[in-house]
Image: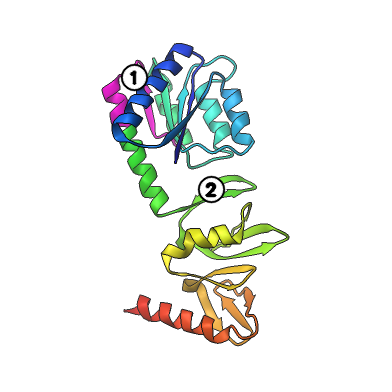
Amino acid sequence: MIKIAFCDDDRDVLNDLHRLLALYRAEKNMEIDDSSFRSPLDLIAEIERGSRYDILFLDVLMPGENGIDAATEIRNYDKNAKIIFLTSSSEFAVQSYTVNAFYYQLKPLYTENFYRLMDSVLSLCKKEQASSLVLHSKNGITRIKPAQLEYCEVIHRTLFIHLVSGKVLECTGSLDELSKQLISYGSFLRPHRSYLVNLEYIQNLSYRAITMSCLAEIPIPRGKYNEIKNAFLEYAFLTDR
């Protein structure tokens, strides 16, 4: 389900946004969850607690902290949310792109403009969701492409995602859940209850261990070698065709 957060100190603006979203949601027959915040500090606090939003509508000029500064803080926790700035002035338009904003929309926001904007941002969200994986790591929410994942291991109930770049993400969740998310990609294998590997990056296979491209060794449980070898050879055959 798509999750949206509206943040504006003007209650009338929030009401208008809720009304427009309700109309859009009904017309498109979509499940979209929305939350409202009248202070950017409240929104940031909610994100710090682990809430994730696919789309953020942020007013630029708000008491206490403006939307650009709030977005800068939000990017420390979530680099993937689509940020749409709402303002009555184009003064901060250039600054908005320093936080990778999706759009800078001048007020008032009319129905036609709102629909066009939602169609565009939801189309991008769907494309990204279909070809990427969202991870909740210690450094915030990260979106990666499955091809970037070399292998994953569980240590004391914590997931360690090893990327091809050498970066390691320490994440919450279970290996069972991650395996279910990746099964449709066809290139992932779980050779051991504590490991998940990307078949694309297997460098060597022996009776005792799988050696990955980064030279990490994944233990092979007794009696599992033939099953793992067959899965690897099948994958290699299909990708070489």
Rendered position, 218 above or below 172: below
Rendered position, 236 above or below 144: below
> How far across and down, in percent of the image, does residue 68 sit?
50, 26
Which span of residues is magenta-colored?
A: 100-117
> How far across and down, in percent of the image, does residue 55 sit?
44, 34
> How far across and down, in percent of the image, does residue 106 sit?
35, 20
The label shown at residue 142 is: 2
Report if residue 44 is visible in the image: yes
- For label 1, the residue is 109
Q: In screen coordinates, is 103 left or right of 27?
A: right
Rendered position, 2 above or below 134: above
Whether label 2 touches label 1, CB < 8 Å: no
Residue 101 lies within the magenta run:
yes
The quadrant in which residue 105 appears is top left
What residue sits 35% from the left and 31% below the top?
25
Report if residue 161 is visible in the image: no
